[in-house]
Image (cartoon, rainbow, N blue to C red):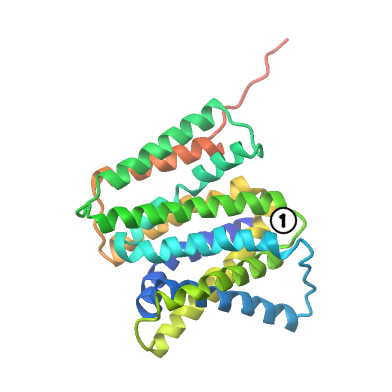
Amino acid sequence: MKPAELAAYTFLAVAWGLSFMLVLHVVAAFGWIGAVTLRCFIASFTLLIIARATKRKLNFSAGWGAFAVVGATTVAGQLIGLSYATPIIGTAMAAILVASIPLFSMLIGQLWGLETISLQSLAGMVLGFGGIVILVGFPAVPATPAFILGCAICLIGCICAAFGSNYASRYLKGSGAWEITIGAFMAGGIMTLPLLFLVPVPATPRPIDFVSLFGLAIIMSALTYVTYFRLVSLIGATKTISVEFVVTVIAVIVGAVVLDEPLSQLQFFGAAIIILGCALVLGLYPKRRITPALP
């Protein structure tokens, strides 16, 4: 990767890795639906204001139907999954499950004919799903129904993220990163807004809660997703989505060291299997150099 691309990749890894701590704070203050809805609207309107101030031309000719699909999956589905699950299963566990997104993305890509499957990719997917089973089946905390439900909802959110990325790659090729991010977050906010009547904001938020919310929405949502979709256009979806591995490492370290969250040895083993499986699926391994035969 070029220096600018590597800088963007690093920004995504650090911002998303640290975002799990803010998710815990924002969900506690605004509820798991309020956190998603407000995050979506703030992110979308922030980019609209910046685009208007810089006289940036936006083209939404792809149609709001396509943006709505990405908003329902990559934005609303994924963020609801993380917001609901993270306080229950912990930041480290949620981050490890997020590492499965490339696996689901590859599987969906195979089903849609966007990529061709190989024996190596198939082996990687088998390893990855085996690692997920180990993670959920052998936790360091009691496997209560709430814990199992949290893991299931987190995985559903990961599937949504994988589906939305493939959908955007297939149907929004002509749209820019700004348009996709604005449209998807606006659609996600509109879709989750009615759910606030079922899951209202628990109490009056404090000023520090709004600081966390705006940080999560602007820095770790608006800016990161624009960077993400831009990076996809530069180095491809496969390489870009591999950033989830680095996100997992950062979030696990933060969860274990800063938040003192417990993880069993088997869960670390499961995480290693997931990362190995994803590396096989994405081809992120050193390739052997073939020396040409002398005549």
Give residue 160's position: percent from left, percent from top. 52, 54
Residue plotted at (22% across, 52% down):
143
**Residue type at numbered disc 1:** Leu
Query: Image check: 134 left or right of 46?
Result: left
Name the residue: 56% across, 36% down. Answer: 283
Compared to 70, does 205 lie above or below?
A: below
Report the front residue among 190 and 7: 190
Asked which quadrant contains residue 181, the reply is bottom right
Asked which secondary structure carries label 1, the reply is loop
Residue 8 placement (x, y as % from top left): 60, 61
Quadrant of residue 53 within the rendered picture:
bottom right
Quickly name the residue at label 1: 172
Residue 178, percent from left and from top:
69, 67
Q: How many marks?
A: 1
Name of the residue lying farthest toward the top: 295
Viewer-closest of 106 and 260: 106
Q: Can I make out residue 4 in this image? A: no
96 sits left or right of 66 in the view = left
**Quadrant position of residue 56:** bottom right
| Location of residue 7 with respect to 197 vertically, above or below | above
Is residue 254 shown above or below 284? below
Callout 1: few (<14), some (14-19), or many (20+) C-alpha neighbours within 10 Å? some
Q: At x 48% / y 71%, what residue is drawn?
A: 36
Residue 206, position as x, y percentages in the image: 38, 89
